[in-house]
Image (spheres, rainbow, N blue to C red):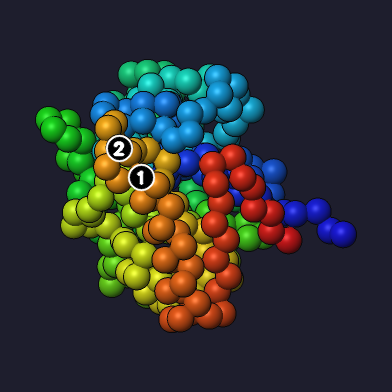
C-alpha cells in the first residue's frame, strides 16, 4: 500500500496539524485546558502536544481562541507564524518569525504552497487590540487542503469549487448559540456543496465548554458534527464527511 502523502491530526477546536509532503502546518493553535470561562473537555494530558513541531503556524484571525499567545509560547523555537495584516506585533515580540498576509497572498513553506483566502467574520483582537481582516488558507501539495478559519458563507467561496481535496470547516462554536460570522451545520453543508471537496472534516465544535453549563446542558456539542454529516449527505452526497475526535488522525492517499 502506498504511504499517505497527507495526514491531518485534529487537536480540538480549530487546531489541526496538517502533515503534507513532509511539511507540518499547524492551524490556530489552542493548546490549553482553559481559556477564560471555558474548559477543554476532556482535559488534555501534559504531553499531548509535545510532538507537534510545526514548520509553520497559520492564524486565521485575532480572537483569543484562535490567536492564543500562551499556546504560541508553548511551541519552542522561532516557528514561522503566518497571520492577518495588523496582528504581527502581538506575536513578533514573543520571538516568532512573523509574516503578515492579506487575501490573495501566496508563499511557499517547505514542500507546500500556501494561498491566503478571504473569510467573513470579525477578525480583530477584542476588546481593545488591533483590528484586522479574517482570512482562511489553501495548503497545496500533492493534496489540496482548505482551512476556513472561522467564517460564514462568502461570495469568493465559489472560487474554491473543484480545487480542494480536503476542507476543514467550522460547524459550531463553544456555547448554546452562534453569533454572526459563523457556520452552523446546515450552512457548513452549503459550503461543502459550493466547494465540492473529496473529504470534509468538521472543526470548531465540542472541545471547549463554559464552566457550569454542563449541569443544565449536558453533552450538546456532540450534535453539530453529526448534523453536519447528515446535511452533507443530503446536499453534497459525493463528499465524504469524517468526524475526528481530538487526537485522531485522518490519512489520505
Above or below, comparing residue 122 to residue 31 in the picture: below
* Quarter residue 30 falls in: top left
Q: Quadrant of the N terminus?
A: bottom right
For the point 35% across and 45% down, the residue is 218
On the image, the x and y values in percent for residue 131 come to 17, 40
On the image, the x and y values in percent for residue 234 come to 46, 81
Mark 1, residue position:
218
For the point 55% across and 46% down, the residue is 245
Assign a secondary structure to mark 1: loop
Q: Residues within 10 Å of mark 2 (few under 14, many from 20)?
A: few
Q: Quadrant of the C terminus?
A: bottom right
For the point 38% across and 50% down, the residue is 221
Above or below, comparing residue 208 to residue 144 in the picture: above
For the point 63% across and 60% down, the residue is 143
* Quarter residue 99 falls in: top left
Above or below, comparing residue 33 to residue 231 in the picture: above
Mark number, residue 45: none
Q: Is residue 133 left or right of residue 163?
A: left
Q: Residue furthest right?
A: 1
On the image, the x and y values in percent for residue 111 come to 64, 47
Above or below, comparing residue 42 to residue 177 in the picture: above
The answer to whether mark 2 and mark 1 are in CB contact below 8 A is yes
Q: Nearer the viewer, residue 3 or 46?
A: 46
> What separation in Å lies between label 2 and label 1 (alpha carbons)?
6 Å
Q: Nearer the viewer, residue 104 or 244?
A: 244
Q: Residue furthest left?
A: 128
Q: Is residue 9 left or right of residue 225?
A: right
* Residue 152 appears in the picture as rendered: yes
Q: Residue furthest front?
A: 216
Mark 2, residue position:
215
The tally of labels here is: 2
Amino acid at each position: 500500500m502506498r504511504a499517505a502523502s497527507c495526514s491531518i491530526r485534529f487537536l480540538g477546536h480549530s487546531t489541526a496539524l496538517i502533515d503534507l509532503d513532509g511539511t507540518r502546518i499547524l492551524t490556530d493553535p489552542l493548546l490549553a485546558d482553559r481559556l477564560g470561562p471555558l474548559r477543554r473537555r476532556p482535559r488534555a494530558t501534559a504531553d499531548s502536544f509535545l510532538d507537534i513541531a510545526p514548520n509553520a503556524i497559520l492564524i486565521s484571525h485575532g480572537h483569543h481562541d484562535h490567536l492564543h499567545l500562551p499556546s504560541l509560547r508553548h511551541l519552542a523555537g522561532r516557528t514561522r507564524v503566518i497571520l492577518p495584516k495588523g496582528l504581527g506585533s502581538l506575536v513578533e515580540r514573543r520571538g516568532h518569525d512573523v509574516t503578515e498576509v492579506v487575501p490573495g497572498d501566496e508563499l511557499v513553506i517547505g514542500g507546500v504552497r500556501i494561498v491566503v483566502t478571504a473569510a467573513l467574520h470579525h477578525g480583530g483582537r477584542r476588546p481593545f487590540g488591533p483590528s484586522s481582516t479574517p482570512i482562511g488558507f489553501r495548503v497545496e501539495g500533492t493534496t489540496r487542503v482548505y482551512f476556513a478559519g472561522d467564517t460564514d458563507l462568502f461570495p469568493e467561496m465559489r472560487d474554491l469549487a473543484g480545487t480542494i481535496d480536503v476542507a476543514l470547516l467550522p460547524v459550531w462554536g463553544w456555547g448554546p448559540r452562534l453569533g454572526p460570522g459563523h457556520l452552523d451545520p446546515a450552512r457548513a453543508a452549503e459550503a461543502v456543496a459550493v466547494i465540492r471537496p473529496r473529504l470534509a472534516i468538521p472543526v470548531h465544535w465540542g472541545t471547549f465548554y463554559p464552566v457550569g453549563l454542563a449541569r443544565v446542558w449536558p453533552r450538546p456539542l456532540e450534535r453539530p458534527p453529526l448534523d453536519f454529516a447528515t446535511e452533507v449527505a443530503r446536499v453534497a452526497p459525493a463528499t465524504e464527511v469524517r468526524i475526528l475526535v481530538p487526537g485522531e488522525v485522518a490519512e489520505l492517499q
